[in-house]
Image (spheres, rainbow, N blue to C red):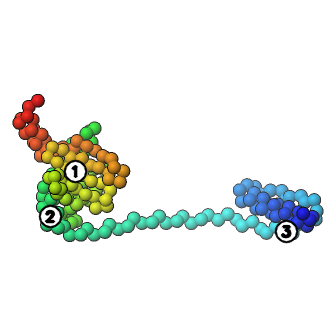
Amino acid sequence: MTPRILLLAGTLVALVSGSVLAQTAAPAAPARAASPAPAAAPAARPATARPAQAQPRPAAPRPLPPATPEQLEAAQLAHYGDYACEFDQSLKVSLNPETGGYVNVAFKGRTHVMKPVLSSTGALRLEDVTGRTLMIQIGSKSMLMDTKIGQRLVDECVHAEQVKVRQAAAVVAPS
């Protein structure tokens, strides 16, 4: 390499390291060059604080489509009220106050808006309108599932009406 290229490379390294040090620490002493002093380095820009980026607002909930007659029928079959679940957990099922034919399921501080669907097996499915959760109600118990990860959130949930079904079954088939 020619001495001129080496001089330019050394100057460039000195400028870059000087500006990095100026931004992160106290000003560095000027670098000594073996040859004539390089031209004055451009003044380092003062560090400016970046404005905080606004967090995106959550999308407004889409209006729910009107309930079908089948959905309204299924909503009448749901057990509304409190459920006692395994491991001292609980959930609550209530009518959705904004849209008839839809159900709210409250569990662990979250409320899921659900669409009631009667299955061919006789089980009542409460399907989350966002597609995340599913509650299944059968005669003697209910369970809440996270369909995205394929796991039960809570099982052995029993409403007062389901307790009656369990008691009646115990009388018919004693152990």
Residue 149 or residue 159, whichever sits in front: 149
Amino acid marked by disc 3: Ala
From the image, which quarter does the N terminus lie in?
bottom right
Residue under numbered circle 2: 70
Q: Residue furthest front?
A: 120
How far apart are the alpha carbons under marks 2 and 3? 81 Å
How far apart are the alpha carbons under marks 1 and 3? 75 Å
Residue 26 or residue 62, whichever sits in front: 62
From the image, which quarter does the C terminus lie in?
top left
- Which mark lies nearer to you, 2 or 3? 2
Mark found first going from the N terminus, 2 or 3 = 3
Tag 3's secondary structure? loop
How far apart are the alpha carbons under marks 1 and 2? 17 Å
Rendered image quadrant of residue 57:
bottom left
Tag 1's secondary structure? strand
Q: Is residue 31 visible?
A: yes
Amino acid marked by disc 2: Glu
- Rate crowding at label 1 as few (under 14), some (14 to 19) or many (20 or more) other CA atoms within 10 Å: many
Q: Residue furthest left?
A: 172
- Rate crowding at label 2 as few (under 14), some (14 to 19) or many (20 or more) other CA atoms within 10 Å: few
Rendered image quadrant of residue 155:
top left
Residue under numbered circle 1: 136
Question: Residue 118 in the image: x percent, y percent?
Answer: 16, 57
Q: Is residue 167 left or right of residue 92?
A: left
Question: Residue 170 in the image: x percent, y percent?
Answer: 9, 35
Question: Residue 98 in the image: x percent, y percent?
Answer: 22, 65
- Rate crowding at label 3 as few (under 14), some (14 to 19) or many (20 or more) other CA atoms within 10 Å: few
Q: Give above or below for 174 relative to 142.
A: above
Rendered image quadrant of residue 103:
bottom left
Residue under numbered circle 3: 40
